[in-house]
Amino acid sequence: MDLNQIFDSSRPVIGVVHLLPLPTSPRWGGSLKHIIDRAEQEATALASGGVNGIIIENFFDAPFTSGRVDPAVISTMTLVVQRIMQMVDVPVGINVLRNDALSAMAIAACVGAKFIRVNVLTGVMATDQGIIEGNAYELLRYRRELGCDVKILADVLVKHAHPISVPNLTLAIHDAIYRGLADGIILSGFATGDAPTHQDLQEAAIACRDVPLLIGSGATIENITQLLKYANGVIVSSSLKRNGQIHQSIDPNRVSHFVEATHSINPQTDLPKIFSEFHIK
């Protein structure tokens, strides 16, 4: 996948809109207008601050299900995504937590979104929702049935989870790319707000080869220079919010300062041409 074709940047900054609790969520507040207004404000702040893309996710719907979300969540997210796409002139993606990739793909195909994020595309992870198994088989066939070209950005050894099947990072990345057909790889730290380690980033960059590698958590204005030594782009949320607090709204000043910091970084140098042998069976 060529990042330039989607984000008009070879090293995109992708901001995240965390939707307020949606209908059927335990913390659902009863006002759809409040959800839409907040989402529109945050998307506008991200776009005006210079991000290259936006992911919309039902972050405040915790606790999440390990399977399909309620139809009301899909309906609400479809409405919100469509509204935001009419307001901003940057590519929009979708993440339906915890791992409802089929619903994310359906929403994206219907509204014309460019990409989705999938927490567990391949492998098996132990999470606070229980055991989550990769769904690449169903997802790739569903994308073909829908006749769309929505790109799949897949987390590998995703945060808030422990691997059961493949604990090795390189093998997990190879599985996601060559057996799960991921269009891009996302690497995060252990939890929301935690950055991946330098060692993991270096290993992931080598394993990804020509497939884009994105930072999935923990990016700040202080560490972004180090993180982008090996990654092709960054997904960022917490550090763009007021006072850096996850429950606060997006701070336009933080967005613009973060984007400026990424623009000041020199283009990444060539990565070591060292690739482990891997045979697809």
Image (spheres, rainbow, N blue to C red):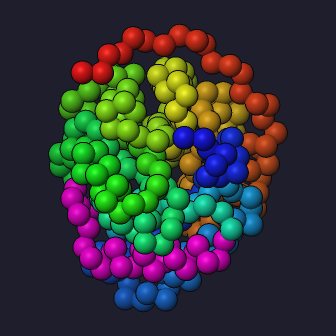
Q: Is residue 246 left or right of residue 129?
A: right
Per the picture, the main secondary structure of the magenta-coloured stretch is helix
Quadrant location, the N terminus: top right
Instruction: Give the magenta part as a residue range.
Output: 63-88
Residue 180 x/y as whole percent = 33, 38
In the rendered image, the residue lying farthest to the left is 131
- Whether residue 67 is in magenta: the answer is yes
Residue 218 x/y as whole percent = 54, 43
- Whether residue 10 is in magenta: the answer is no
Q: Residue at x 47, y 38 (%)?
A: 185
On screen, residue 72 above or below 229: below
Whether residue 270 can be seen here: yes
Residue 67 x/y as whole percent = 21, 59
Using the rendered view, name the quadrant where residue 142 is placed. Answer: bottom left
Q: Is residue 68 left or right of residue 97?
A: left
Quadrant location, the C terminus: top left
Q: Residue at x 62, y 44 (%)?
A: 3
Residue 103 x/y as whole percent = 32, 64
Whether residue 20 can be seen here: no
On screen, residue 95 above or below 29: above
Using the rendered view, name the quadrant where residue 191 is placed. Answer: top left
Q: Residue at x 27, y 76 (%)?
A: 71
Q: Residue at x 67, y 55 (%)?
A: 52
Q: Is residue 233 left or right of residue 278?
A: right
Q: Name the residue nearer the viewer: 14 or 37.
A: 14
On screen, residue 135 above or below 96: above
How many marks can you see?
A: 0
On screen, residue 248 above or below 127: below
